[in-house]
Every structure is written in structure tokens, then in C-alpha cells.
């Protein structure tokens, strides 16, 4: 596993959370980005799993457009059946394999 939480200080964890929230809040309607992209832009490129954990378990994340975050191949979160319909309601196109069409809908911060 690439996520090494023990290497982050308390201040690092707080800044990481704030950076993740800031980046996710900027994802435009009709676009998606990846856990890895968010981790890299937050300054911790090997912490993509921690992005997912931050979005799932941190109070306050529920007001963010977390449904716009997918894995690197465009796969939606397992066990979150509403994510696909939320993305489709924004015009996001899915391929025949069930993944987001990343060529059309990938957004990179900044």
C-alpha cells in the first residue's frame, strides 16, 4: 500500500484535508477528476487512497461534489450506486464498460 499516514504530521494531515476539499470543490459540473490527480495537486502524489478516505470519513465532505471523483480509469466508487446517476444528470458519458469517458470528462486542476 502506498499511503503512509505515519509520515504525515498532524499539520500535514490538516493541510492535506484542506487541499483535498479545496480541489474537489472546484471540479466543474459535467467533469470528473481522479483520486491520484487530487493527491498529486495536494502535494502527496502517492496518497490517492488517502484522498478517498478523506472524502468518505471527514465531516463536511458531504457538501462537496465528491461524486465527481473517480479512479484513474474512470471507474466509480464501489457500493455508491447513486454516483453514476448523479454524474449522468450532469451530462457525463459512460463507456460500455461502465467507466466514465475520461477523454471527454477529465478535469485537471489549475
Image (spheres, helix red, strand yellow):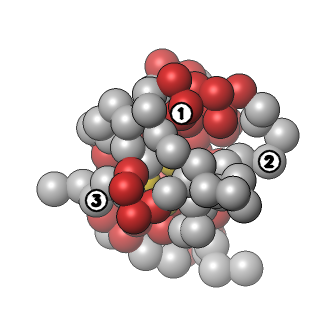
Task: Reply above or below: 70 against 65.
Answer: below
Counting residues from the start of the chain, the first of labels 3 and 2 encountered is 2
Image side of residue 5 versus residue 24, left or right: right
Task: Reply above or below: 79 against 35.
Answer: above
Mark 3 falls on what kind of element? loop
Give me the C-alpha separation between circle 1 and circle 2: 15 Å
Q: Residues within 10 Å of mark 2 (few under 14, many from 20)?
A: few
Q: Residues within 10 Å of mark 1 (few under 14, many from 20)?
A: many
* Circle on res. 108: 3
Residue at x-position 50% and y-position 57%:
101
Mark 2 falls on what kind of element? loop
Foreground of the two, 74 or 91: 91
Task: Reply above or below: 88 against 105.
Answer: above
Give me the C-alpha separation between circle 1 and circle 3: 17 Å
Q: Which residue is mark 2?
A: 78
Residue at x-position 48% and y-position 67%:
36
Spot the residue most to the left.
110
Mark closer to the observer (1, 3): 1
Q: Which residue is mark 1?
A: 87
Foreground of the two, 8 or 59: 59
Q: Is residue 9 visible?
A: no
Where residue 74 appears, x then y in whole percent? 57, 59
Amino acid at each position: 500500500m502506498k499511503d503512509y499516514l505515519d509520515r504525515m504530521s498532524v499539520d500535514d494531515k490538516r493541510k492535506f484535508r484542506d487541499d483535498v476539499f479545496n480541489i474537489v470543490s472546484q471540479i466543474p459540473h459535467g467533469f470528473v477528476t481522479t483520486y491520484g490527480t487530487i493527491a498529486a495537486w495536494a502535494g502527496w502524489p502517492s496518497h490517492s487512497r488517502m484522498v478517498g478516505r478523506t472524502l468518505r470519513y471527514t465531516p463536511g465532505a458531504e457538501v462537496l461534489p465528491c461524486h465527481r471523483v473517480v479512479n484513474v480509469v474512470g471507474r466509480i466508487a464501489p457500493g455508491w450506486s447513486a454516483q453514476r446517476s448523479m454524474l449522468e444528470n450532469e451530462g457525463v458519458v459512460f463507456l460500455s464498460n461502465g467507466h466514465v469517458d475520461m477523454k471527454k470528462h477529465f478535469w485537471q486542476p489549475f
